[in-house]
Image (cartoon, rainbow, N blue to C red):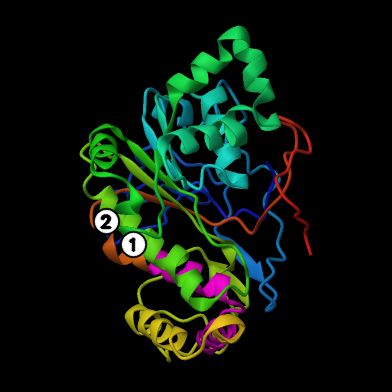
Amino acid sequence: MSVWNSLFVCPAIRKPKNLLCSDHHGKKSKVSSLVTEKHHSKFTRASLNNGNGNVSAKANDDLKVPLEGESSWGKGVGIVNFFQGKNIFITGGTGLLGKALVEKLLRSTPVGKIYVLVKADDLEAATRRMTKELINSELFKRLEEKHGKYYQAFMKKNLVPVIGNICEPNLGMDADSASAIMKDVNVIIESAANTTMNERYDVSLQTNVNGPKRIMSFAKKCKSLELLVHISTAYVNGEREGIILENPITMGENRRKDRSPFPRVNISDEVNLALKSGTKSTGYDATKDMKRLGMERAHLYGWHNTYQFTKAMGEMVIQETRGDIPVVVIRPAAIESCYKEPVPGWIQGYRCII
C-alpha cells in the first residue's frame, strides 16, 4: 500500500496532554513510547502546505518502518514484538486501508484475534461479507499461499466478524459481543470514515465526529486496552501555509489562513446546526442544502471541504476525551495502490491522484 506524503506515525504516549509525539533530529521524546523506547530521526515532523489543501513536500524516502529483522535502523522499532498475541478490534476493516492493514497484520505479525466490525443484518450475513471482501479477496492471495490448505481454517480462527455500525449507540453491537471485546481486546484501530469531500454535513458529522466519540467511549470500557489508533488525514491542517508542525488539534481550534484564533469551533453547535437544518427541507433539496452547509462551515473555519473539517473535529474529540488512553494518530495525505506487497498494483474501487 502506497501512502503518499505520510507525515509520521507517532508512538503512543501515556500523558493525556500529549497526543502526537516522536523523536526528531536524534533527540528523544520527553515521553516514552509504548511501542519502543527509541524513535529515529528519519520521520519528518512538518508538512508543506501550498494553500490549496495539497501537501507539496514528499515524504522522506527513508520513511520506512521495518517490521522484522535487521535494518538500517538496527533492530527496528519493535512493531512485531508489540503485536505478539495482541487481540485487535478494527472498524473500517473492509475498506481500502483497513483491508490492507488486516492482511499485513495477519501475514507479518504474530497477532492474536482480529475483530472486524461489519455492517450486516445478522451474523450469517456478516460472515458472508467478511468471506467475500477479506478471505476470498485477491489481496490475501499471498497469505493463502503461505498457509496452503490450512488457509481457511487460519482465517476463521483469527478473523472474527462483529455486527455493528460506528454511527449507532454502542457501535451497533449487541451486549454479548461488546462485553466479549471489552474483555479481550488490546488494540483498537479506527479506520472507518466518510471520505466524500462534499458529503452532506449531517452524514459526515455522524461518521467522522460522532464515530470517534463513540469509539473513545467504548475504548474506556476495555479492560486490557494498550493502544488506540486513529486514522486521520494530513488535510486537517486546512488553509494554513508554510511549515506546519505536526501538533495535536485541540478543541475549538480553527485552521484559517490568517491564523486568527477566531471564530472558535464549537462541535456541539455544529451538530445542532446540522440537525436543525436537516428538518427545513426534504428530498433532493435537503441533500443539496446539507452539502452546501457543510462546505460553508468548513470555509468559515479554515478548511477546504466538509471531509477535512469533520476529520479535524474528529481529532479534537479524540484529544479532548482520551484521558489516559494511549493514542496514535496517523495522518496520510493520499493512499493508492500496493507498491510491492502483497499484490503489486492492487487497489479497491476507482481512485486517482488529482
Magenta residues, start to end = 291-316
Viewer-proximal residue, 87 or 248?
A: 87
Look at mark 1 in the image and give the residue it sits on.
213
Q: Give the number of the disc on residue 217.
A: 2
Residue in the foreground of this view, choosing between 242 and 105: 105
Q: Where does the image place residue 237, in percent across and percent down from the top left?
A: 55, 71
Q: Amino acid at mark 2?
A: Ser
Is 268 or 10 nearer to us in this picture?
268
Quarter containing the N terminus: top right
User: Is residue 236 among what the camera can see?
Assistant: yes
Mark 1 in CB contact with mark 2 (< 8 angstroms):
yes
What secondary structure is the magenta-colored segment mainly?
A: helix
- The relative height of residue 132 versus residue 12 in the rendered view (above or below) is above
Quick check: 292 above or below 156? below
At a point 34% along the width and 43% down the height, the residue shown is 227
* Distance (Cα) linking label 1 and label 2: 6 Å
